[in-house]
Amino acid sequence: MNRGLIRLLPAAVAGVLALALAGCADGDAPAPHSTRAPSYVEPPLPSGAITAQANAPLPPAAANCGDPTASLRPGGGASTPNLDAIRARGRLLVGLDPGSNLFSFRDPTTGALAGFDVEIARELARDLLGNPDSIEYRILGSADREKALQEHTVDVVVKTMTINCERRQRVTFSTSYLQAHQRVLTVHNSGIGGLADLAGKRVCVVRGTTSLDLIRVQQPAVSVLTVPSWADCLVVLQQRQVDAISTDDTVLAGLAVQDPATEVVGPNLSTEQYGIGISQGSDDLVRFVNGTLERIRSDGTWNRLYHRWLATELGDAAIPPPPRYQD
């Protein structure tokens, strides 16, 4: 019986039950009922979760590289070893994360990967191999993106990857294909209105993201829980093991769709330019990728993809970032 119903039993009925129990032989008497409230056991943290306490040492600042979004102009260069290898293989190896709602996720009906980043990758395969389906996806966590490029286990990473000088020390990038802004996600009526309210609170961030460094620099009084994926962050927020999540508004919008009890709050904390990650020294592939991005900006493909996947959550006024070239 439901305990709430037991509390609502009339006093007379309760008295009858008491008399019935009193008439039982000692050997038949039920064990005494404990009135102590059950203790709460906090759910375990996701596998790989690590807590960094407030005022932990900050990462060293990266050297200034000028404009990190400047990339190689499409065309030019007679040698195309990377393009030739991909064409000989017959498929493009793409690193992404199937846990990024709106960007790359499993369609619950078909089981196929779908989303804005998936469509960008399909446009690359369309131009390079003549078939948007000529892709082999490699699943990567945010912390694994650069290693996969350095070890050449993928050709490109299309995974909400911010272009910055620190990352350019290890990998290279296309021109920017989407602009985002870091913000904060919390539950409704939490009393948290932005970064200033996070002092002394616990925030979830994924390892290997620029969001982690920014939150530690701009709010050093926060305790940071790092996890492998944004889906893990949503779970620990729902279980109230953290007070908020902080990352790009594009990612937060996807999490908010999954849980309507959450909301994105506060002003923009930064501007993030997303680029397609490519191995250093792959200049022919960089130029080719930038050629595809030029095409989808000019022929309406970018706008079509944006309105299909992102406009409802992020607004329909966005335009593709203009390309910046270093040559």
Image (spheres, rainbow, N blue to C red):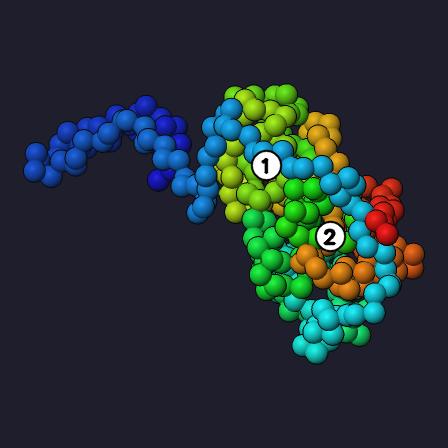
Q: In the rendered image, which quarter is residue 237 located in? A: top right
- Image quarter hosting the N terminus: top left
According to the picture, the residue beneath numbered tag 1 turns out to be: 212
Residue 63 or residue 312, whichever sits in front: 63
Q: Residues within 10 Å of mark 2 (few under 14, many from 20)?
A: many
Image disc number at residue 173: 2
* Residue 264, x across and y down, in percent: 68, 33
SS for dot 1: helix
SS for dot 2: strand
Image disc number at residue 103: none
> Is residue 168 left or right of 153 when viewed as pictured?
right
Residue type pointed to by label 2? Phe
Q: Residue at x 70, y 59 (%)?
A: 281
Residue type pointed to by label 1? Leu
Q: Residue at x 43, y 41 (%)?
A: 45
Q: Is residue 10 above or below residue 77?
A: above
Q: Residue at x 62, y 58 (%)?
A: 149
* Residue 43, x across and y down, in percent: 41, 39
Q: Residue at x 46, y 42 (%)?
A: 49
Residue 202 or residue 31, whichever sits in front: 202
